[in-house]
Image (spheres, helix red, strand yellow):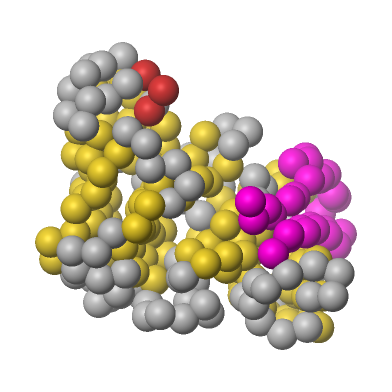
């Protein structure tokens, strides 16, 4: 079974703090993704990566950056957290460069910015 | 903007009935389609995927795809209270990326 592990289940941070969300997958997947999920807005793609040190912007990259130094690890960084970044953050991974690969999700990190 | 549309629901069905969940998508070039189930407070889990026109069955679940109409559906036979969840339709819309609908909430009453 694919295992995608997010380092924190719940996180509370203050406005202006730098926040790191970590994600690790154990299936040697090439692709990794960060989504956020908000009521009424659904899942929205923030960034994704298809290889080490590669990154691509998703639909809502503003206010976020990412890092992928190793194949199994994909980090989401909030440079200066704001209250509108309070959300559920979901990391996912998938295999290969195929349109047919499903995404496998981690358990999510519920971030609250006060 | 590539869009995936679902009725938000809730869709209420009695136990044992067939639940029918529908999804339309805007990108005519999309080739693969996925259904995820998400329980409250949990992350999405994959139920089924379908690539070809027609039906695909897996246990109590059947996915149906009509590319000409840009329509995907999920049927759940013999619905159980444990099927109560939000069902997300997802469509491949770019390099290895999925675009998700906002989900349909299904409520199965005993």
Outermost residue toward the left? A69
Image: A2 above or below A106: below
- Membership of B24 in magenta stretch: yes
- Residue B55 sits in which quadrant? bottom right
Image: A80 above or below B100: above
Examine the rendering and report whether any part of residue B97 can be seen.
Answer: yes
Name the residue: 80% across, 67% down. Answer: B70
Quarter holding the N terminus of chain A is bottom left
The image shows residue A39 at horizontal and vertical percentages of 57, 32
Name the residue: 19% across, 68% down. Answer: A52
Q: Is residue B27 left or right of residue A4?
A: right
Name the residue: 43% across, 51% down. Answer: A58
**Front residue of A72 and A110:** A72
Examine the rendering and report whether any part of residue B42 can be seen.
Answer: no
What is the total number of numbered labels drawn onto the structure image? 0
The image shows residue B27 at horizontal and vertical percentages of 69, 64
Q: Is residue B35 left or right of residue A73?
A: right
**Front residue of A39 and A34:** A34
Quarter holding the C terminus of chain A is top left
Name the residue: 63% across, 33% down. Answer: A40
- Membership of B105 in magenta stretch: no
Q: Is residue A99 left or right of residue A64?
A: right
The image shows residue B33 at horizontal and vertical percentages of 64, 71
Q: Is residue B68 left or right of residue A35?
A: right
Image: A5 above or below A31: above
The magenta segment: B1-27
């Amino acid at each position: 079974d694919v295992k995608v592990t997010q380092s924190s289940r719940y996180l509370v941070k203050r406005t202006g703090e730098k926040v790191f969300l970590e994600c690790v997958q154990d299936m040697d997947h090439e692709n990794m993704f960060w989504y956020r999920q908000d009521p009424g807005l659904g899942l929205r793609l923030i960034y994704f990566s298809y290889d080490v040190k590669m990154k691509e912007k998703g639909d809502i990259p503003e206010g976020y950056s990412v890092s992928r130094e190793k194949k199994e690890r994909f980090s989401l960084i909030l440079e200066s957290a704001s209250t509108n970044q309070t959300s559920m953050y979901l990391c996912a991974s998938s295999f290969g460069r195929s349109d047919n690969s499903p995404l496998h999700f981690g358990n999510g990190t519920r971030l609250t910015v006060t | 903007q590539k869009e995936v549309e679902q009725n938000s629901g809730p869709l209420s069905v009695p136990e044992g009935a067939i639940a029918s969940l529908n999804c339309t998508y805007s990108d005519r070039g999309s080739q693969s389609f996925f259904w995820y189930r998400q329980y409250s407070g949990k992350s999405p889990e994959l139920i089924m995927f379908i690539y070809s026109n027609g039906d695909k069955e897996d246990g109590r679940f059947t996915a149906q795809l009509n590319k000409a109409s840009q329509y995907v559906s999920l049927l759940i036979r013999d619905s159980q209270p444990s099927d109560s969840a939000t069902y997300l339709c997802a469509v491949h819309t770019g390099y290895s990326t999925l675009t998700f609908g906002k989900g349909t909430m299904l409520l199965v009453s005993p």
